[in-house]
Amino acid sequence: EVQLLESGGGLVQPGESLRLSCAASGFTFSTYAMSWVRQAPGEGLEWVSSISGSGGTTYYVDSVKGRFTISRDNSKNTLHLQMNSLRAEDTAVYYCGKDQTWKEPHYLDYWGQGTLVTVSS
Amino acid sequence: DIVMTQSPDSLAVSLGERATINCKSSRSVFYSSNNKNYLAWYQHKPGQPPKLLIYWASTRESGVPDRFSGSGSGTDFTLTISSLQAEDVAVYYCQQYFNTPQTFGQGTKVEIK
């Protein structure tokens, strides 16, 4: 059974950093691209970032480029999102998702339960 | 960026009746080299993660009831729930994965009339 478990969310002040993690199990982690998708309070879904199965190719939405870094540790079946210079508009539930392909992000067939990030002074 | 626009924003349908959600992309998401539309549909219930319903515009995900169907090509797509059940109350999103940034529609809230 595929399981994705996010952790690392919390309350931080503007300008601070946070590192999200997603522990994966139930599938061969290194053979699938992975993604982060967020949902701000009262808003819809927004794709944030994706990474290929090898970790060699990464993709970002413009609003987080230069501030967020996606990475993965295939030896530990774990996905990460390092979030720096956080802004109030980054407040959201962050979901990790398993992609259906190895390289370019496509659709997500499994999602974690999400972790809440709140950026507020 | 490809903009995805869903209509309506919300709809109320009687139990057992048909629900239809439309999704329009600002550019075609059809890739002629493999004859596929890069379009997915998700169901999102409060307190739960989104659930994949449809991919490649019309392929139903394993385990999804056959009352859910997807159609369309190019820039215009439709998700149809043929006979609405109580458990189908949710927000539905279309998503294009033709290129990055992947983009979602704003969502359509489906309720029982």
Image: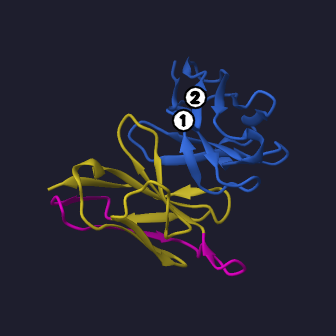
Vertical comparison of B95 with A6: above or below: below
Residue at image mark 1:
A112
Picture coordinates of residue A87, whole percent (x, y): 59, 30
Q: Nearer the viewer, residue A101 or A93?
A: A101
Q: What's the mark number on residue B75?
A: none
- Image quadrant containing the N terminus of chain B: bottom right
Crowd rating for badge 2 (residues with CA inside 10 Å; few <14, some 14–19, many 20+): some
**Which quadrant: the C terminus of chain B?**
bottom left
Front one among B48 and A25:
A25
Check residue A5 in the rendering and tell me which mark sits there, or answer none.
Answer: 2
Q: Residue at x 65, y 50 (%)?
A: A99
Q: Amino acid at mark 1?
A: Gly
Report if the CB atoms under discs 2 and 1 are less than 8 Å apart.
Answer: yes
- Sequence-first tag of 2 and 1: 2
Helix, strand or loop at disc 2?
A: strand
Q: Secondary structure at mark 1?
A: loop
Is residue B16 located in the magenta-colored stretch of the structure?
yes
Coordinates of residue A23 in the picture (x, y in percent): 65, 28
**Highlighted range, magenta:** B8-37
Q: Is residue A7 above or below residue A41?
A: above
